[in-house]
Amino acid sequence: MKRYFIHTFGCQMNVNDTNRMSEVLAGLQYQPTPVAEDADLIILNTCSIREKAEDKIYSALGRYRQVKTQRGALIGVGGCVAQQEKDKILKKVPYVDFVFGPDNISKLPEILDKVLIGRARVVETAWVDSEEYVFPRADPESSRGRVTEFVTVMKGCDNVCAFCVVPHTRGREVSRAFPEVLLEVAALARVGVREVTLIGQNVNSYRGGLGFDQLLLRVAEVPGVERVRFTTSHPHDLSDALIEAFRVQPKIASHFQLPVQSGSDAVLKRMRRDYTVQEYLERLAKLRAARPDIAITTDIIVGFPGETEEDFERTMQLTEAVRYDNQYSFVYSSRPKTSSALREQEWGEIPHEVKVERLDRLQKLQKKIAAEINALHRGHPVEVLVEGRSKTDPAKRFGRNPQNKVVNFDGDAPIGAVVEVQIDRTSVGALYGVQGRTLLAPTIEISEAPLAPELCAVA
Ligand code: SAH
Ligand code: SF4
Ligand code: F3S
């Protein structure tokens, strides 16, 4: 039997696509191996959101070149860099055998035939943009042993944010029909999954026969499901109906990832994010009124072309005003085909040292806020869905609270149980404590180690 190794970069869309690739490869009698050196087929599932992400892929390819020389492994490049660069990858990296875009995963058997039998180098990056796009249904058996799982509800992005490659690498938005989503969730719940995260680049513009708020409410009612999460959302789609769903359905977990990108209206305008800071804050206030304990996280870009010190100060002020539970902040990176890349000269590029210095200031502030918010839990119980052994200390258990914070604790609760944990210590990134009473027993027995072998390395 042949063995494959997939190296996954980037976001949850890619993690999910890696699972789909694994299923297609299983059908071709390939087995996963956690060691690239043992593989007959190596696939890089790539991300191109920032230049650094793209650079990582070329250095990883350099490492896998040896496996090709030593055991003749095939090397394929999938994901967003594949979609963006197409045949340029074959020219740039002579030992890559095939390149395939995110819409061409189901074509892997034909691609491998062409490479192995036809001895050709292959590029497959055609879009499947139509509403007839079939979202492959995940095999629930591959989720046995997990309590939390991702479910794709849409693909692509119809927004036009000036800095972003996603519309170019993932194509137009297509939503998955809601009965399909519900069937997949029900199948996952039957193998013990208790928390599902609905994923897409823009989930709250979902149009699969129901509004996104209705989809969340229906998913929350699937027997066995205790928590529903979703990621990610654009602030302009944070509708009153979605806020109402948070008010009425406690199974929708108390966490909202709401990327703001900048605290300056002038920068937001150039970014083509169609809201003002004021509008963003008003939406947030409504959401917090409906769900007072909700954790808010965000994405920020620092050093967008033309960002002045005052613009950046506004981002600092917004960070203080909102008091985010967490921020994913990055320095602006110029990306091919994006509208901001074309206007950098006109707006004014920000020197690298300035960008890095601003990012550092922002991250220090955010760390302080996150530590303060987490410290409020000290001496109080939190509700934890148990996921397994703690990654930092195998003698302890770990899970997450509704706000999506990692909780490490002393106790012996079975995987899949919901327990109270009394918090005695906190850090910027996690809460620590001791197990208290059990709130819910697991729906089925889940063994300690996940049954599925580790399929890929995520970076
Ligand atoms: N669809 C999601 C974003 C996906 S990309 C949304 O709109 O929320 C994840 C994050 O990467 C973005 O929110 C943005 O903060 C960051 N990002 C995207 N393009 C970038 C670029 N060119 N430079 C730096 N950061 C970028
Ligand atoms: Fe990119 Fe904007 Fe779409 Fe998010 S909403 S994926 S930032 S274009
Ligand atoms: Fe990266 Fe593509 Fe996701 S660019 S962030 S892997 S959609």
Image (cartoon, rainbow, N blue to C red):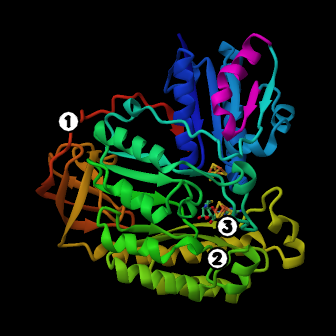
User: Tag 3: residue type?
Assistant: Val
Q: Is mark 3 within 8 Å of ligand 1?
A: yes
Q: Does residue 95 sit above or below 228 in this rendering?
A: above
Q: Is mark 2 within 8 Å of ligand 1?
A: no
Which is nearer the N-term, disc 3 or disc 1? 3
105 within the magenta span:
yes
SS of the residue under disc 3: strand
90 within the magenta span:
no
Identify residue for label 3: 331
Identify residue for label 2: 358
Position in image of residue 165 (x %, y %) = 73, 56
406, 25: nearer the viewer: 25
Q: Quadrant of residue 228?
A: bottom left
Q: Quadrant of residue 255?
A: bottom left
In the image, what residue occupies the spot 49% across and 27% down?
34
Q: Which residues make up the magenta segment?
A: 96-118
In the rendered structure, find residue 445 and report the number of the disc placed on it: 1
Q: Residues within 10 Å of mark 2 (few under 14, many from 20)?
A: some
